[in-house]
Image (cartoon, grey):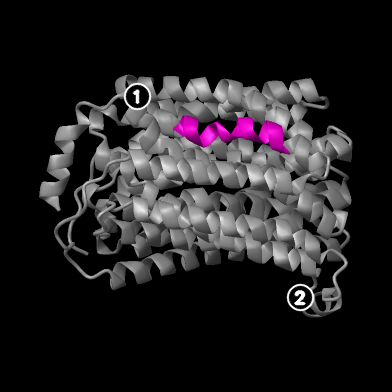
Amino acid sequence: MADTLEAQDLIKKILYWRDYITINIFWFGINTVTGSITPVILPFLIALYVPGELKNTYLANIRVASLAVAMMVQPIAGSLSDRCRSRWGRRRPYVFAGAILDILFLFLVGSSTLFIDSPFDAFFESNLGVTAAYAALLISIILLQASNNIAAGALQGLIPDLISGDQRGRASGVKAVMELLPIAVVIAIGPLVDTGRLWEAIGVVMAITLITMLITMRFVHEKPLKEKPLGDAAGPLLRLVALAAIFVGVSQATLRLVRSIDAYLLSYSADPVLQVSLVGIAGFLAMTVSILFGVYFGAWSGIGKLARRQSSFIWWVISRLFFLTAIGSIQGFAYFFLRDIIQIPDSRTATMTSILLAAVALFLIPSALVGGYLSDRMGRRKLAGISGLIAAGGTLVLLSARDFPLVLIGGCIIGLGTGLFYASNWALGTDLVPKQEAGRYLGISNLAGAGAGIIGVGIGGPIADSINSLRPDLGYLIIFAIYAALFLLSTLSLSQIRGTIQTAGSI
């Protein structure tokens, strides 16, 4: 395998911009799926299927269940792709399979509307406490997360496989742009959803998934792995399953603690101001503890005995998770924030959410390109640290916003910081992972990707509903303040990263 990788290194010197684009193009497809489902289609459907006062909790339940599956699937797919000996190469067979399954499961998401006022409602409500439509949506989203992460787990290996170290900043910048360009697609999807044309919106997502997959299959050139990889695959795969179980277990334990504190205060009729303050502090501590302990023990489970030599990689995942928890949760709650805090009418909420995300993209995309260029010159850690400070400042602007123009300003500041973060932080990660096991290690880094929703929305959703029941709409402001603090912790945790490429070894 080493000979194969060295042969690939000879090709890397002559890469052109079109190569950076084709290597990363399927990130556009993957993030069109998540970028349309998470902020627009999923909240829209949940609002149809569940009681309004519990919508954040039901959103959290669906996100936690589906992201727990994503957390397990992505590193397993990445690890299996490391060992794949297909004539298509190591990564593209998984891209193909994931894309085809994405299209199938997107169809199932749309089909959940067929179960509104279903004769099965009585059965599901008596046994699970949810409607048949919500149950169908839950199953569809779980399956979609699994298929999307089959592709993502393998796709993460392409940059370390095909791009040399001195060009990875630029490649990561292009990757960041491909992850962010779907925001432009959401501009079209939002009005379609608002006007009831859900199937047209889903059709757009299906088409983009198919087209970007076909471009990847046609224009990305991988060298097949000729030698059988050393070592047993079963042990590492079992550790990856344990990784997901540990992380979800830690986060759910802290959530139960927060709910216990909330219930205790309610039972003693505590002063509402005191209760809001204590639940908010408990929520912040729960998210912080979940990130630190969840990543630490999860990474040890996923990596094995070599984890003690990979402390910089583990701290990189922690820093990444702090940031992505904040930005992903702000995005996830944007729909309800605009509807409840800014008082956007229901008939325009998806459209205005789309406009907000598009405005963010105006700052986010160019800053990602510039960030990729700068990270090759001024250093990955320094730029990633600056990005956390910028994003925290933008979140504070959101906290003071009571009209849509100020929301746009805050979103654009967050977009600037997020673009710099996406490019510089990912380039830092590709420097830290062992090249021969890039798929597995970058799959383990999905502790940050999937874990962000499990913690940020999974804990934040119930907190928002609880505080909103005491002081209407205050819950969103409390959790957004928590997310601002997480941006700052992302910057602080970078100080624990030392060195660059870690050496792999037998596990």
The magenta segment: 176-189
Q: Is residue 312 magenta?
A: no
Q: Which residue is mark 1?
A: 17
The alpha-carbon separation of the residues under discs 2 and 1 comes to: 52 Å
Disc 2 vs disc 1: which is toward the camera? 1
Q: Which residue is mark 2?
A: 128
Q: Classify 244 as above or below 452.
A: below
Q: Is residue 178 magenta?
A: yes
Residue shown at the point (26%, 53%) measured from the top left:
437
Q: Residue 430, position in %: x, y?
A: 31, 40
Residue shown at the point (58%, 35%) measured from the top left:
182
Residue shown at the point (39%, 65%) measured from the top left:
240
The reply, left or right, for residue 409 in relation to residue 502 is right
Disc 2 marks a residue whose amino acid type is Leu
The reply, left or right, for residue 179 in relation to residue 253 is left
Residue 314 marker: none
The residue lying toward the viewer, choosing from 35 and 94, is 94
Residue shown at the point (30%, 72%) measured from the top left:
234
Q: Classify 181 as above or below 315.
A: above
